[in-house]
Amino acid sequence: MDFQLILYFIAICGFAALVHGSVGFGFPMLATPLLALLTDVQTAIMLTIVPNIFINLVSIKSEGEISKAIKKHYKLVAYTAFGSLFGTAALIQFETPVFKVILALAIMIYLITDTFKVRLHSIRKYPEISKVIFGLISGFIGGLTNVMAPTLIMYSLESGQSKRDIIQSTNLCFLFGKIVQLVLFAVSLKFTTYTIYSSTLVLAIVIVFVPLGIKLKTVISEHHYKTILKTLLSFITIALISQTFT
């Protein structure tokens, strides 16, 4: 990896970690598409797997009562992990620039649902079926693009979960989805010296910048950060689509 690319990595991952620490989400949703602009989606996901696992563990631990959270959300976690298995397998099997468009569409789903406050009342009416559907879809999209937050957050909000439940359930789903990805990439021998070295660099950046983001939380309002995040994601979506078809 040349020096200029290292600087890009530091800037991208540092910013994504800073945002995540400030608002509690955003690292995979920002880091993956930004890294995909420099490489492909598969490599971008591999570079962020270990850092994502670290962030998920920190987030879960911060809420406490981990064993209770696992007992409460294990079904959703299992469905998500199962979906991630198929999504990651598809990502490994078919290396195509079209995945950048799918990544862009996943981000668009988040932006649309957040902007227009999309409501799905059927989730509370059919809780078990909804859990299966949203778990599998979230896992598949997450395995394919690294962005499972939109559907998971939609499910969590509509099912009436508390703030703690949302943080723990989503991060448990992220965690086991990332573990599935890690295993499949390792078994398929996709990890190279380059990706291992770069992933270690990303992890080091995350460890430094997430705590800084947490400190910034008290200085800059969450509203301003979310506005910046959504604006940036809109530009990233356009860039991903443009890059694929030009």
Image: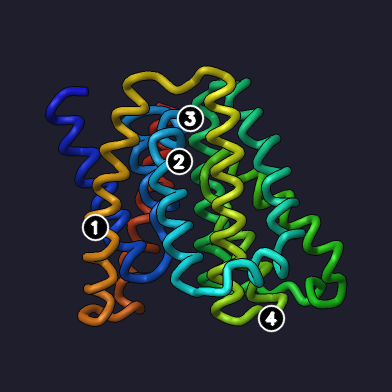
Q: Position of residue 240 (x, y in %)?
A: 41, 39
Coloring applied to the structure: rainbow
Please, is residue 73 above or below residue 236 in the view?
Answer: below
**Tags 1 and 2 in contact by the CB under 8 Å rule?**
no
Quadrant in the picture for residue 225: bottom left
Please, is residue 32 above or below residue 152 in the view?
Answer: above
The residue singled out by tag 3 in the image is 42
Q: Position of residue 11 (x, y in %)?
A: 20, 46
Q: Earlier in the sequence, mark 4 or mark 2?
A: 2
**Tags 4 and 2 in contact by the CB under 8 Å rule?**
no
The residue singled out by tag 1 in the image is 209
The residue singled out by tag 2 in the image is 49
Q: Position of residue 145 (x, y in %)?
A: 54, 41
Instruction: Tell me the quadrant of the picture where the N terminus can be found.
Output: top left
Residue 160, labelled with which disc?
4
Q: Residues within 10 Å of mark 2 (few under 14, many from 20)?
A: many
